[in-house]
Image: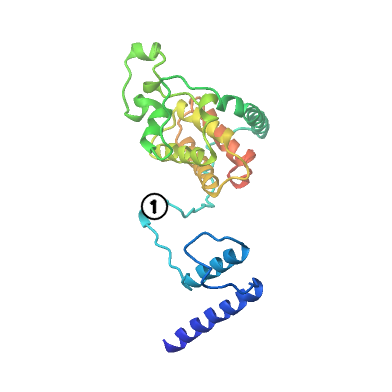
Amino acid sequence: MISNRKERKDMKSDVEELMPRLLPLESCDTEEYNSNEPPRNPQEYLRQVQREASLCPDVVVAQIDPKKLKKKQSVNVSITGCLAAPQGFSPSLKWQQQQVSRFSEVRQSVNKHRQHWKSQFLDDNVVMPKSEDEDGWKRFCLGENVCLDIQLKEEDKVNPGLDYVKTGFPPFLSIVSKLNQSTISAVLEYLMNWFEERDFVAQLGRWFYALLACLEKPLLPEAHSLIRQLARRCSAVRANLESKDDDCLSALNLMICIVARYFEQNDLADKE
């Protein structure tokens, strides 16, 4: 302990000796200089800086509130590939190339018009949840009917109307253009949490497509992990489809294609 104190004292002494050499000061009458008053000239300012520096502790320990730390800071990227598609369920290479080309055009259009749509006011009935509100975003994107598993009556299926609270808000450009990259990743994660435990629905596919179109390259680590998770989940759902005529097949293939081919996760790509 004595040795440590001596080292700290010597270190402080060295600093005090060094500062006058780096910041040479003219002699100043101590009676005229009052450290409690604002400096009146450069010499007094430098003296005040040296005095404040001498009062600083050698070691400072930050007081961190664990409650304010962001949860799930670690990002685990799985290298597990997609499940192979059943015979006849996977798309051709030509189809995949066409989808990548179209998706690239959509992204260019989104980037081109982002500032315009970002400046547009939303209708009064569009209340976007806060970034950290997972349940709020699930209801906003998918609607109460899907989130609460409400069975629609036959007449409601024929004429559902435009009650977006029940059916979910479509990913309009005026909405998604207002999301920053952090929020896009958060919403993608919320929808993936829902999708991991449930079947694919059309409204979910629309939002996945829109969020992928807004993701900026290079991807953040969280986004990179999420899109791989999306492709793997789509392949798992596809593997359980009973018919090639299932309405979900094309959308599932499209999600896998975009992640694998456009975002260059080649190990997840469907092979011919």
Residue 2 x, y percent position in the rendering: 43, 88
Q: Residue at x 41, y 36 (%)?
A: 130
How many neighbours does mark 1 have within 10 angstroms: few (below 14), some (14-19), or many (20 or more)?
A: few
Quarter placement of the C terminus: top right
Residue 212 x, y percent position in the rendering: 56, 35
Q: Is residue 180 visible?
A: yes
Element at badge 1?
Answer: helix
Residue 138 x, y percent position in the rendering: 40, 33
- Judge from the rendering whether residue 101 lies leftward or rightward of residue 90; answer left or right: right
Is 124 above or below relative to 186? Answer: above
Using the image as rendered, state which of residue 145 and residue 2 is in the foreground: 2
Residue 129 x, y percent position in the rendering: 41, 32
Is 243 above or below relative to 45? Answer: above
Using the image as rendered, state which of residue 193 and residue 18 is in the foreground: 18
Q: Residue at x 49, y 30 (%)?
A: 207
Q: Residue at x 37, y 33 (%)?
A: 136
Q: Is residue 90 visible?
A: no
Quarter placement of the N terminus: bottom left
- Judge from the rendering whether residue 265 lies leftward or rightward of residue 231; answer left or right: right
Mark 1, residue position: 68
Using the image as rendered, state which of residue 17 and residue 270 is in the foreground: 17
Q: Residue at x 64, y 44 (%)?
A: 264
Outermost residue, bottom direction? 2
- Judge from the rendering whether residue 41 lies leftward or rightward of residue 244; answer left or right: right
Question: Which amino acid, by three-letter code, is at mark 1?
Answer: Lys
Colour scheme of this structure image? rainbow
**Figure label count:** 1
